[in-house]
């Protein structure tokens, strides 16, 4: 016993302690209920150190889930051209994340957790619903914005799953631009299109 | 030792032996490569007995995966009103399957397997692509029918996952008819709509 406080000295061990504490908190409480302050307390460090190492709670979550920080950077720009162009940006972002094995592997891990136990599902739901889809819903601002963005999110995750996990053909081997265009258009229809409008009959004239 | 052949006498043990053999074969070889004959041989029974107990290979697969047989019956009627109405029928079928805990549980098990190991993913892919989406693609008959049905399939599985596994709100608590209508329209657009057409800008007049 050195008689000092429980605060850990070296940067390396503090970082590891923070990530372990974050993983335990997120797994037990989901995403919403966890605060950076609580994680810092569990790790025996000052909250300022968590912010200095990782940034905010979103980045801490990503780091705890071993998702490379670059993977999240694109999300900040999803609404740069407004909601009328968010569909393709979202499709491109999700496609790039899932096409990169270093990002796909932890994302598949998150998905596996979500399909395996309700606590992990809650954690993924709160992160996806709040941090990723929330800003899009607020930018939409319509009464049905929540439903629209949830449907858009379901299309994005379904396409990633079918293409990069199930390898469902011909989606799996379609080139990236084709996938981004088609999924992007579908997501855009979810966000700002007429939701009730189904496809034209096959024989109908196309514009 | 009774000196008799390896064929099993009682219906109960034969049925269990067939299901065990089917599970082992499907897990090892995927869906496409497995024949009823091979499963019968592994189980030490006549192929006719497999057909008598289960029907065809689709039903054998469902039984081996512990999916109640009723769950698959609806798939036969998906094209009854033609591809121009398949979207809503597909959405209704998938929604009903995933809303029923007795069906959802084995489906989640299949999904968990697919997210966990490539052999299980191959099995699910071959079953979904061949048995469920294949007939829709053939009914469409267009050069892009495979891509359209794969995208439609990705929307169906994404919606089921978001609603019934992740419980993403407000999709999770939306009433069933709303979900069937909206997902059905999205699937129909995938099947017969203009795939490149994205949503109207928010300010544009709606019909």
Image (cartoon, coloured by chain):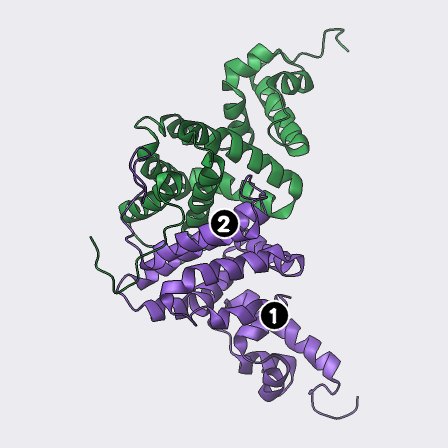
Chain colours: A green, B purple
Report the disc number at residue B199.
none
| Label 1: which secondary element | helix
Q: Say which of A135 and A128 sits in front.
A: A135
Chain to which mark 2 belongs: B
Chain to which mark 1 belongs: B
Q: Residue furthest bottom?
A: B3
Report the disc number at residue B159.
2
Vertical position of residue A179 compared to residue B109: above or below: above
Residue A201 image point, x, y percent: 30, 62
| Label 2: which secondary element | helix
**Residue A142 visible to the viewer:** yes
Give the quadrant of the N terminus of chain A. top right
Residue A139 image point, x, y percent: 41, 27
Q: Upstream in the sequence, badge 2 or badge 1?
A: 1
Kindly identify which residue carries mark 1: B70
**Pointers 2 and 1 within a single chain:** yes
Residue A136 image point, x, y percent: 42, 31
């Amino acid at each position: 016993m050195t008689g000092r406080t429980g605060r850990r000295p070296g940067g390396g061990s503090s970082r590891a302690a923070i990530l372990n504490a974050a993983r335990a908190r997120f797994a037990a409480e989901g995403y919403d209920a966890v605060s950076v302050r609580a994680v810092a307390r569990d790790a025996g460090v000052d909250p300022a150190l968590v912010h200095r190492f990782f940034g905010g709670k979103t980045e801490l979550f990503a780091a705890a889930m071993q998702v490379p920080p670059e993977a999240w950077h694109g999300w900040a720009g999803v609404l740069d051209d407004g909601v009328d162009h968010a569909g393709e940006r979202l499709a491109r972002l999700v496609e790039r994340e899932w096409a990169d094995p270093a990002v796909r592997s932890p994302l598949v891990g998150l998905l596996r957790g979500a399909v395996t136990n309700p606590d992990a599902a809650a954690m993924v739901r709160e992160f996806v619903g709040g941090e990723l889809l929330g800003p899009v819903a607020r930018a939409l601002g319509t009464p049905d914005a929540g439903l629209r963005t949830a449907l858009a999110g379901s299309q994005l995750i379904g396409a990633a799953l079918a293409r990069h996990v199930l390898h469902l053909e011909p989606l799996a081997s379609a080139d990236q631009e084709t996938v981004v265009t088609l999924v992007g258009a579908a997501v855009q229809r979810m966000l700002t299109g007429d939701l009730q409008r189904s496809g034209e009959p096959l024989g109908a004239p196309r514009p």
